[in-house]
Amino acid sequence: MKIIASVPAKAILFGEHFVVYGKRALATALNLRLSVEVSGRAGEGYHLIVEDIPLFGLDMELTSEYAQPFINYDEAARAIAYIRSAVQYMEREYGIDGGVELRVSSEIPLSAGLGSSAATTVATIAALKRYFGLWNGDLDELRRDAHKIEKAVQGNASPTDTAISTYGGYVLIEGGGVKRLRDLPEIELVTGTICTIPVGAGHESELRLKTRELVERVKTRKEAFSSVFEHIASAADELTGEAVVALRRHDLTRLGSLMNINHGLLDSIGVVPRRLSELVKLAQESGALGAKVTGAGALPDGTGTVIALPAAGHSDELRIAMGLTGAIVRDLRTNAMGLVVEEE
């Protein structure tokens, strides 16, 4: 038996980082997908193959022992910490005992603000639960499982990414709860991803789980400037509410302006390095109604993604301008389908 679980990428349109402190966030699924295939193998343990992920590939053995799920892989294990944690969680909570091969393939670049970690977690949990006969199709239960794993890896993780990976479409995070918004329209986005991880064998160890470090940096800034930070966070919360209304009305001009303001707030809390800031400014000057970083942002030497909302008739101009910077540029659509699980 072979189980294949497929999930979408995500873009946080409004509210990243501030959602950790109880503010609203709006996210959407994008039409890039990641899949995890689980099949049987001879013997015990787990064989993991990571393939077709931009800039990264890995073939390794895992043990079935909870105390030491990896053998002598040092930094490479950091790059797949979510798979490791998912396997640990499934062993601890559901009693699975290995004897499977996991094959991960993806169109989503790692550590670039497009939800690769949540996608990997949700797809891995879904495939393993279905393979071992432990899942009845309850999406809410699956999302909760995946969120526990993200929190274990990242620390203070919001439920936004795992919700999008599970449900697809649009979700609003409000008061710590997840609300699916089914009445918002699909829109076009142009995304530009800056990758600074070298391509080729031997560079796997240069991948880093940057989300935890970025969240900690924001926390430090919040503690140092608590009253100022609260005003910034409240403004971000208001922007999210305004954005839902603008999207519902399909008022893309207003939505773009709100994106520009949100980008400024993210810059003020220190999660926008120079290269991403320059890419946002270029997009704003090249036919975008609005542009901003999405997701956690980036460390000074890390990867990151800018989302831009093109004005009518300016998509080509925008795509060409962003591509000339060396960014990986894609035309994407929002409101994509969520988790799909198939059996072969």
Image (spheres, rainbow, N blue to C red):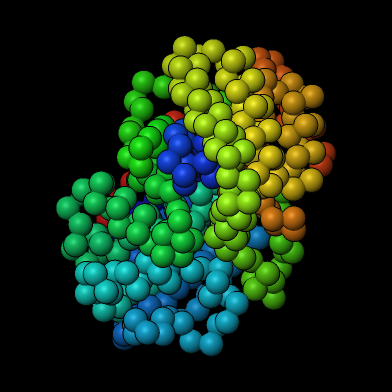
Query: x and y percent of residue 119 in the render?
Result: 44, 52
User: Which residue appears farthest toward the front when viewing the image?
Assistant: 227
Placement of the C terminus among the 4 image quadrants: bottom left
Query: x and y percent of residue 334 in the render?
Result: 49, 31
Residue found 71% across the figure and 61% down from its top: 197
User: Horizontally, is 166 left or right of 244 in the view?
Assistant: left
Q: In this view, does 60 lie above or below 21?
A: below
**Quarter of the rendering containing residue 127:** bottom left
Query: x and y percent of residue 255 in the render?
Result: 57, 20
Of residue 285 and residue 192, the one placed in the foreground of this image is: 285
Q: Can residue 42 be seen in this view?
A: yes
Residue found 79% across the figure and 38% down from its top: 278
Count of picture labels: 0
Query: x and y percent of residue 246 in the render?
Result: 50, 16
Q: In this view, does 244 lie above or below 71?
A: above
Of residue 65 and residue 137, the one placed in the foreground of this image is: 65
